[in-house]
Image (cartoon, helix red, strand yellow):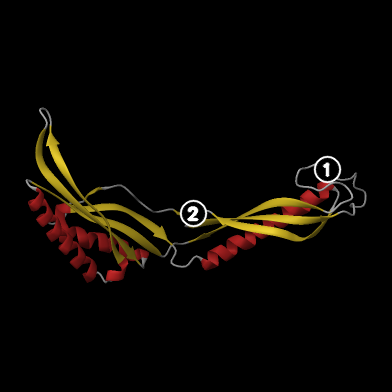
Amino acid sequence: IGMLAAALLIAVVLNSRPVSGAAGPVTAAAVGAPGAAGTLTVVGQGSSGSRPDQATVGLGVAATRGSVQEALNSAAAARANLLKSLHAEGVQDKDIQTSALSINQETNCCPRNVSGYTVTSWVSVVVHHVGNVGPLVAAVVSAVGNDIQLNGVNLMLSDSTAQAKADRAAAMADEAIRATQGAGLSGRHLGGIGTGAEAHEASQYAGGCGGRGGAGGRGG
């Protein structure tokens, strides 16, 4: 379940007329001097939960061979199998983006000797239905074999508009409580909203997984 939090910073105008029976304004940096209009700055927080409906999957291939050219050729063949498998699972080209490419020496010690070269190629894949992630990963493992790499599954919402609206409403309700309490403690009456600002925290979803590593499958 995803959580998206909204925080609203509001400056509320405090009318100078004291609340009946109040002892008078409480000294505070956010409240104006007694007998003058002032403001009270409050921060309201609100959050709501939602179930993610799509995911981004980090997939790649890694080929270690005796020469750079051999490693490049093997990685290119493995990548072709990866892309073919993704297409067979219904993934469109617009949802596949190359994210990284690297060439590294493999060495032994000691003495230090170059034993081979590893070429790694990564793609980021958008899966529009969370339920398709498992079958897709199984398909690419079968297609690529031992050269496959998985670099995490990140769950997300395709449209967070409704959740942001719910968060905003919860934050406003929280602010109303805080502003009312602050005005009462300062011996003032609430006026209108002076200024406002809004901030959202990054969404966090349970069920995501990470970690880079190979996954065995049919030989390749």
Query: Does any portion of residue 207 appear in the rendered image?
Result: yes
Q: Which residue is mark 1?
A: 26
Going by the image, does 107 lie left or right of 39? Answer: left
Residue 22 in percent (x, y) is at 90, 47
The first of marks 1 and 2 along the sequence is 1
Residue 27 vertical placement versus 14 (above, below): above
Going by the image, does 133 lie left or right of 29? Answer: left
Q: Secondary structure at mark 2?
A: loop
Disc 2 packing (10 Å; few <14; some 14–19; many ≥20): few
**Residues under labels 1 and 2: Cα distance?**
36 Å
Type of amino acid at the residue the image marks with label 1: Val
Residue 63 in percent (x, y) is at 14, 51
Task: Name the quadrant of the C terminus.
Answer: bottom left
Asked whether 35 or 93 is in front, the reply is 35
What residue sits 20% from the left and 58% below the top? 141
Type of amino acid at the residue the image marks with label 2: Ala
Q: Which residue is mark 2?
A: 202
Task: Kindly indicate the quadrant of the structure image that contains residue 7.
Answer: bottom right
Going by the image, does 170 lie left or right of 93? Answer: right
What residue sits 92% from the left and 52% below the top? 20
